[in-house]
Image (cartoon, grey):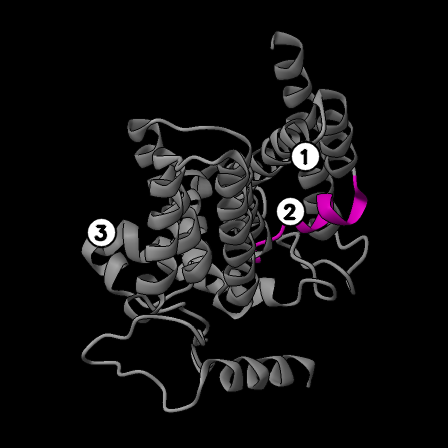
Amino acid sequence: MPSRCRYLFIAAAVHVLVAITIFLIGHFRVLPGIFDQNGISLTFAIDGTTYQHVASNLADELQHNGISAWLNAKAPLHSRLHSISFAIFGKVFGYNILGAEPVNLFYYLAILICIYVIGREVFNVQTGFIAAAIVAVWPSFLVYSTQLIRDAFSIACLLGLILVLVLLLSRVFSWFVGIAIGIAGALLATLFWVARGNMWNVVLVAIAITLVLLVTRMIREKRFIAGNAVVMILIIAAALLGPPRLESTTLPGVRPPLTPLAIPTASQPAAREGIWTTAIKQISTRRA
């Protein structure tokens, strides 16, 4: 374990070094057509400039008007989290990628840990380590993970949920552990919806496949695994109840995404179209 932690420290150092390098490139206008003075990409992560303004305004709101004003401001979840980092570290580093680095570094390390554990559970320790090591130094991922876009946060949530689903199929949980793991899975699914609702169908498919595999496992083993069933029920409940009650907040002027499969609320009745019709329309819109 100490040796594995050492590799995490090395990965963290690499990420910080990349963030500093990108910031200096932007600050000194070495590549002015690619990075601005805040180290934010003007090409491959163009939304970052908009999110930087949103996070900066939220940070000012938090510092000058308090938590209530910060909570009442409508903004994407990942920008809200970046604004906390700006509020804490912005006085030293500024409202740039260095000011957001503590949060981005956390996402980066969380992704690596999830990849390692998933690889270990599905295959073995060596496979998990190799997979995490490849992702850790993958150039495009390293650069993207320094930006103010929602990718790193949503990927971390999705991989965390996939890890819960993998453990659900590979282990046997007690009631108590099942409730704890189920709450974690439900929270991760909900966070992914709020952060990136336009990719929600991926979560629905993953949950559906896991449900089929869990039922198959119980039939094959000729026993009902109560703790694992609790995990599945909690995650399904979050997937069906969360989206109609929590808006997947986007930028102003962008229509919030909808899910084809959910238990509607009284104020938001079910859509007249069927599940498959809605799903096909969403796929068609994404392709366009």
Amino acid on which disc 1 is placed: His
Could you tell me residue 125's position as x and y percent?
70, 21
User: In this rendering, does residue 93 appear at all?
Assistant: no
- The residue positioned 41% from the left and 57% from the top of the image is 77
Is residue 236 shown above or below 184?
below
Question: What amino acid is at disc 2?
Answer: Ser
Residue 15's tag is: 1
The residue labelled by disc 2 is: 145
Residue highlighted by disc 3: 67
Q: Is residue 249 above or below residue 40?
A: below
Q: Position of residue 98 (x, y in %)?
A: 57, 42
* 146 falls in the magenta region: yes
Relative to 205, residue 232 above or below: above
Dot 2: within a 10 Å radius of its alpha carbon, few (fewer than 14), some, or many (20 or more) residues?
many
94 or 44: nearer the viewer: 44
Give the magenta range.
138-149
Residue type pointed to by label 3: Ile
Circle nearer the N terminus (3, 2): 3
Local secondary structure at mark 2 = loop
Distance between the alpha carbons at the discs numbered 1 and 2: 8 Å
Viewer-side label of 3, 2: 2
**Quadrant of the image for the N terminus?**
top right
- Asked whether residue 141 is drawn in magenta, I would say yes
Label 1 Cα neighbours within 10 Å, binned few <14 / some 14-19 / many ≥20? many
- Give the farthest residue toward the front: 222
